[in-house]
Every structure is written in C-alpha cells, then in structure tokens.
Amino acid sequence: MESYLRIAPLVKLKPSNSHDLVGVGLRHPHYSYVLENKPPLGWFEVHSENYFMKGGPALHFLERIREEYPLSLHGIGLSLGSADGLDKNHLRRLKDLIYRFSPFLVSEHLSWSRVNETYFPDLIPLPYTEETFSLLAQNIDEAQTFLGREILVENPSSYLEYRDSIFSETDFLASLCRKTGAKILLDINNVYVSSFNHGWDAGAYIRAISPEFVGEIHLAGHSLRTFEDGSVLRVDTHSSCVCDEVWALYHQALQQGIRAPTLIEWDEEIPDFEVLMQEAITAQGFLEKKEVAYG
C-alpha cells in the first residue's frame, strides 16, 4: 500500500442514533469556514471523484475536516449501468479513498455514463427491464465485493421514460436491494422532479419505498425550465433551497418510518454556509418532530 494512503482517526457519530444525523454536502468554498467555525452538523458528504488525486490542497482540507466529522463518499462516475462492466481503475481509486477516510456511507447512482473509454458528463437513465436488472445486479455485486462493503444506490432524476420498461422505478430498486444487499439513497428532490416531469404520484412513490431498504436521504433544490409552448420541466440543478413540496414529501417519508442520515445538497450557485446551515436546521426539526417553518 502506498504511503500516502492514511486512515484518518475514526470519529464517534453524534447523536448516538445515526439515523438522526443531518449533514451537508461539502464544497471547496466552505473548507475554511468549516474548520474555523466547526458548525454543529452530524456529517459531511463529498463527491468521491474530486479526491482521487494523491495529494494537494483538497485532500489536505478533507483530512482536517475528517478529524472533526464523519464523512460520506458520493460517487458520480462509477457507471453502475454500463454494459461494458465496471472500470477497474475507478474501483481501485475508490477503494483507496475509502481506506484513507473510513466513510460511514458510500453511494452511487442508478444510471450509466460510460461506453468503452468514452465518458459522458451526465447520469443517463436506464430502462427498467430484466436485462438491465441483471446487469446492474452483477455490477453492484462486483463493486461491493471489491470494496468489501455495502453501497447505496440513488434513485435518478429523469427527463424521459423508456417504452421497454416493465418495472416501476420503486419495484426495480427494491428488487435490486433484495438481490444484492445494497440499499437505497432516497433522493426526495429526485422523486419530486421525476414525478412532475412524468406525471407520477410523488406521494405514492414514497409510500412504495420500504424503510428497511433506505440507507440515506438527500434533500436539494431544483430549477424550472419553461419552453415556448408553455410546457415546464423541472431540472435537478441543486442550485436553490429545498422547495415546500419536497419538505412535505420528506415529512411523509419520516411519518411512514423511513429514517436515515439526511443530507442537504447544493452544487451550483453555492451560497454562504449559513444558508446551508438553515436548511439543515429545518431538516433536524422534522426529525425531532418540531413545528418548523420552511419555504
């Protein structure tokens, strides 16, 4: 093992019930603020691929933050749905990162983004068929075996549906969990975005999710795109506060027993950290069954 691979000290999760941990996506504009102010958060999540290098300022800051907070690794490039199989070099780099930082959660997306050696800058959705189920189950099994741990798979935000699909998205995810032992990263903003775009019932989607399969929850904002014909598309941009409808779906999920570490995501037009902190406080209020103001 190369010398640069160093495990950071393990951090005890607080509160003791990790299901009630609220975290924030860690982005580089906030490194110094977090270290100087040590905000009262349960954890931070980072995009795995941003830390695949062997050294440099980003890893230095992450090591210092890891000494104070638990970390989660959220991947965007493993391409679990690739028919070419998994990129072994990508898997090795992810395993090195896991060894170095001992994250308490590791997650990826229900999508594909690679053909041969060509990588696409998007998380492309899959048809929900027997063939794609077998492919995903095989790739998830390979990833979990190589990494030596469970991974979480995030439900996508989508803007098209395939005629060939024979499963609902919720049934497809549940079957993958039963087959592979993986769990769901339930992105509630993605549920709302996809449901709006396709005319699904977002509440019915949440009701179809079994609490036992959920290992993490994401909350985020999105954008509206209006076209010349007056039609509207919701786009998962992570560039605004969580909307009222997503907070309501989060409340529904908690009411039906879905409890998991909850993350506030914000990836574009990143605001001052205090804005993210207020979103986290709102989420904590829902977890603690407090009356909260949002919107």
Image: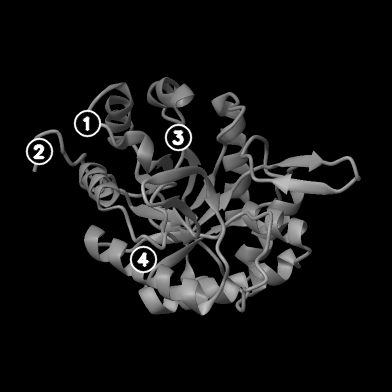
Residue 14: image x %, image y %?
38, 48
Alpha carbons under labels 2 and 4: distance apart: 27 Å
The residue tagged 2 is 2
Q: How is the image coloured?
A: one colour
Towards the viewer: 54 or 217 = 54
Q: Nearer the viewer, mark 3 or mark 2?
A: 2
Residue at image location 21% in from the left, 42% down from the top: 100
Query: Label 1 neighbourhood size at 10 Å, few (<14), some (14-19), many (20+)?
Result: few
What amino acid is at disc 4?
Ile
**Discs 2, 4 touching: Cβ within 8 Å:** no
Query: Label 2 neighbourhood size at 10 Å, few (<14), some (14-19), many (20+)?
Result: few
Residue at image location 9% in from the left, 38% down from the top: 2
Alpha carbons under labels 1 and 2: distance apart: 10 Å
Secondary structure of the residue carrying numbered label 4:
helix
**Discs 3, 2 touching: Cβ within 8 Å:** no
Secondary structure of the residue carrying numbered label 2:
loop
Alpha carbons under labels 3 and 1: distance apart: 19 Å
The residue tagged 4 is 140
The residue tagged 1 is 54
Residue 55 at least partly seen: yes
Q: Which mark is residue 26?
A: 3
The quarter of the picture where the C terminus appears is top right
**Discs 1, 2 touching: Cβ within 8 Å:** yes
Left or right? Give the position of 287 relative to 293.
left
Residue 222: image x %, image y %?
68, 42
Query: Label 4 neighbourhood size at 10 Å, few (<14), some (14-19), many (20+)?
Result: many
